[in-house]
């Protein structure tokens, strides 16, 4: 398992978190402690650091860079929500996209440190070394900016959280791109889902330990998820690839351990959100986007994250066996919005995957009868009044 | 047999006493809602000092002068004779169920039964209220009940606080999309 780009034995990279949010600092600290012991150590100040980390999206980044003027031989790794925008502002910096790929980061830090030591000048802008991770993740880190890791500032671009992936062809046949998929085990959702299953099967509460704050799940009397993370912390955490060994699930007699400003969610709602944030418009690994499925129920939309068109997707998908690709075609919307709902519904337990044989046409093109969404009993003048009411509600809320 | 009255655009709000009908209509209405409250004489007085024995009435004003009436049904069974008249020609039903009642799943069953004909020709969206005070039964228990009662496709059912305009609007949006998932919202 050589997931670490830095070979053991090489000297530790002394990293100072020069300009980093507290949540990022905790996640990175955790990674150092548990995962990067052989490659990175945290320096307590700029003087003793060989490389520093800078979040370009945080206020005060200019003064952070000013401090660096006195340390030309210290390597610098920046990261930002929109690396390209910052590249024009800070032309000679290495700027990684968020979320930080924690698997690849030690290697990038090490080479930035080496670079800094070699040259007096600021390191030239270049692409970071190819991360030692699957292509799906690498492609995402370069092309898909959305999330922030660590501070709860929501920018416009983050709002839809469904990425920028283009549609698949309407019929199967072509090989599916890697970037269509995410591996839930790389994200909080994998751990959370396992904890929920264990709580259900054992009847005992379960704690997810090893993260900066605790998350607990309990199946009785109603399934709940209790956490010390605030909602604006849970989202960036859910979007971040966690070191594989970061979190562990332990049985607990109760959730009384969780006491600091705890928030309680219905488990289903929590799974829905954490999955949506990990998925960002992608499907869980192994899902056939051309295979018909159905929603067994509407998600609890007054509480959960709603990606664009989620209400329409749900309205259609509770009544029709259809593949994600078909649903998108029938509603005339980008597939990534349907993939987002699929990923959430699957982890929230709202997806039925075994279509009765009679209703399973081997997924092909959108079924003709439903090509225009069904309008059960509404008389002809209805659509206009319905959409006028809808517009009113959307505008006024 | 639809009369002229049936041409009115209206959305019906129903549910048990105290579920939040008057509150929901007030949250959504563009006019101060008219509520024909009367002193309750039966045991609902224990639940509320006054209750809606006639109906609540609110309005959504659409651009161009068109109106959508929001009608709340009387909460008490003895006024259920009014429900058919009230709902005639309505766009759909918003059903509010008070989770803090002794047997909310039975309430659900009763109201769906009472509005069966109306729902089969239109649609229903269900809000479970007072879940902040009573966490059980959870939404999944309601969904199971709906399946047992043969409601397929399953209607929208959300946790709702009737005091929240966003929550109430979400129910109405779900109702509209249930009637037509192809509605264009832009
Ligand atoms: N705690 C809590 N109170 C609610 C909720 N929904 C409505 N209420 C309150 O419940 C009371 C009864 O509501 P009302 O609209 O008069 O019920 P109606 O009889 O159905 O018209 C009001 O005081 C509302 O503010 C909820 O979800 N939680
Ligand atoms: Mg009332």
Image (tube, coloured by chain):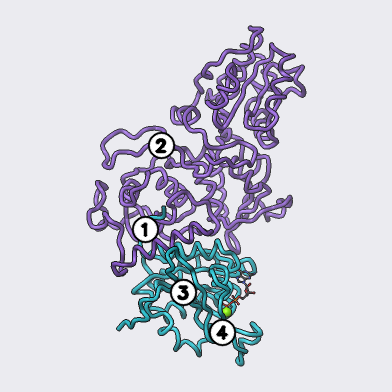
Chain colours: A purple, B cyan
Q: Are marks 1 and 3 in contact (CB under 8 Å)?
A: no
Residue A27 quadrant: top right
In-front residue for pair A83/A226: A83
Residue A201 visible from this viewpoint? no
Give the chain of mark 2. Answer: A
Residue of label 3 = B69
Q: Is the residue at mark 4 in contact range of ligand 2, meaning its CB lies under 8 Å from it?
A: no
In-front residue for pair B145/A308: A308
Residue at position x 42%, y 70% from top? B124
**Residue B160 in the image, given as x and y percentages of width and height:** 55, 65
Q: Given this view, does label 1 or label 3 mark the residue nearer the observer?
A: 3
As measured in the structure, the alpha-carbon distance from the residue carrying label 4 to the one carrying label 1 is: 34 Å
Relative horizontal placement of residue A88, taking residue A138 as reference (left or right): right
Asked if both marks, 1 and 3, belong to the same chain, the answer given is yes
Residue of label 4 = B36
Residue of label 1 = B183
**Which callout, 3 or 4, points at the residue further toward the start of the chain?**
4
Residue of label 2 = A165
**Residue A280 in the image, given as x and y percentages of width and height:** 48, 41
Residue A176 quadrant: top left
**Which callout, 1 or 3, points at the residue further toward the start of the chain?**
3
As measured in the structure, the alpha-carbon distance from the residue carrying label 1 to the one carrying label 3 is: 20 Å
In-front residue for pair A359/B74: B74
Q: With respect to residue B138, does A169 lie above or below?
A: above
Q: Ligand 1 sits in which quadrant?
A: bottom right
**Which callout, 4 or 1, points at the residue further toward the start of the chain?**
4
Q: How many marks?
A: 4
Residue at position x 28%, y 42% from top? A170
Give the chain of mark 4. Answer: B
Give the chain of mark 3. Answer: B
**Residue B28 in the image, given as x and y percentages of width and height:** 54, 67
Farthest residue toward the front? B64
């Amino acid at each position: 398992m050589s997931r670490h780009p830095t070979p053991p034995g090489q000297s530790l990279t002394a990293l100072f978190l020069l300009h980093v949010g507290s949540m990022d600092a905790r996640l990175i600290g955790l990674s150092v402690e548990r995962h990067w012991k052989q490659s990175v150590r945290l320096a307590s100040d700029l003087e003793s650091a060989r490389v520093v980390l800078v979040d370009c999206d945080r206020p005060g980044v200019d003064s952070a860079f000013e401090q660096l003027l006195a340390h030309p031989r210290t390597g610098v790794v920046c990261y930002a929500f929109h690396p390209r925008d910052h590249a024009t502002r800070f032309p000679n910096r290495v700027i990684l996209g968020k979320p930080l790929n924690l698997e690849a980061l030690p290697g990038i830090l090490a080479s930035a440190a080496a670079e800094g030591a070699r040259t007096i000048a600021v390191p030239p802008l270049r692409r970071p070394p190819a991360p030692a991770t699957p292509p799906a993740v690498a492609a995402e880190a370069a092309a898909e900016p959305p999330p922030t890791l660590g501070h709860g500032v929501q920018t416009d671009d983050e709002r839809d959280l469904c990425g920028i992936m283009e549609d698949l062809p309407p019929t199967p046949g072509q090989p599916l791109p890697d970037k269509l998929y995410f591996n839930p085990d790389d994200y909080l959702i994998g751990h959370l889902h396992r904890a929920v299953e264990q709580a259900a099967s054992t009847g005992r509460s379960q704690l997810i330990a090893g993260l900066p704050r605790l998350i607990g799940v309990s199946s009785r009397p109603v399934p709940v998820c209790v956490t010390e993370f605030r909602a604006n912390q849970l989202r960036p955490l859910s979007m971040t690839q966690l070191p594989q060994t970061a979190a562990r699930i332990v049985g607990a007699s109760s959730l009384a351990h969780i006491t600091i400003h705890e928030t309680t969610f219905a488990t289903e709602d929590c799974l829905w959100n954490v999955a949506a944030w990990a998925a960002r418009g992608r499907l869980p690994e192994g899902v056939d986007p051309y295979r018909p499925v159905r929603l067994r129920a509407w998600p609890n939309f007054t509480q959960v994250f709603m990606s664009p068109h989620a209400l329409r997707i749900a309205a259609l998908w509770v009544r029709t066996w259809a593949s994600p690709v078909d649903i998108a075609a029938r509603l005339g919307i980008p597939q990534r919005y349907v993939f987002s709902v699929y990923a959430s519904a699957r982890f929230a337990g709202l997806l039925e995957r075994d279509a009765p044989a009679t209703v399973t046409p081997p997924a092909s093109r959108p079924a003709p009868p439903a090509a225009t969404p069904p309008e059960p009993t509404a008389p002809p003048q209805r659509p206009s009044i319905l959409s006028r009411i809808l517009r009113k509600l959307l505008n006024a809320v | 047999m639809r009369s002229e009255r049936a041409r009115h655009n209206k959305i019906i709000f129903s549910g048990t006493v105290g579920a939040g009908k008057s509150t929901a209509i007030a949250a959504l209405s563009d006019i101060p809602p008219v509520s024909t409250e009367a002193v309750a004489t039966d045991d609902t007085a224990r639940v509320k000092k006054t209750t809606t024995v006639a109906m609540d009435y609110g309005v959504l004003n659409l651009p161009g002068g068109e109106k959508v009436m929001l009608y709340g049904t009387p909460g008490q069974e003895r006024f259920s004779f009014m429900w058919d008249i009230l709902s005639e020609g309505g766009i759909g039903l918003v059903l509010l169920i008070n989770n803090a009642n002794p047997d909310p799943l039975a309430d659900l069953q009763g109201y769906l039964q009472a509005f069966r004909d109306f729902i089969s020709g239109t649609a229903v969206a269900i809000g479970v209220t007072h879940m902040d005070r009573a966490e059980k039964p959870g939404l999944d228990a309601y969904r199971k009940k709906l399946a047992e009662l043969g409601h397929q496709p399953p209607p929208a059912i959300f946790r709702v606080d009737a005091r929240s305009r966003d929550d109430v609007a979400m129910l109405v949006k779900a109702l509209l999309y249930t009637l037509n998932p192809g509605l264009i919202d832009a």
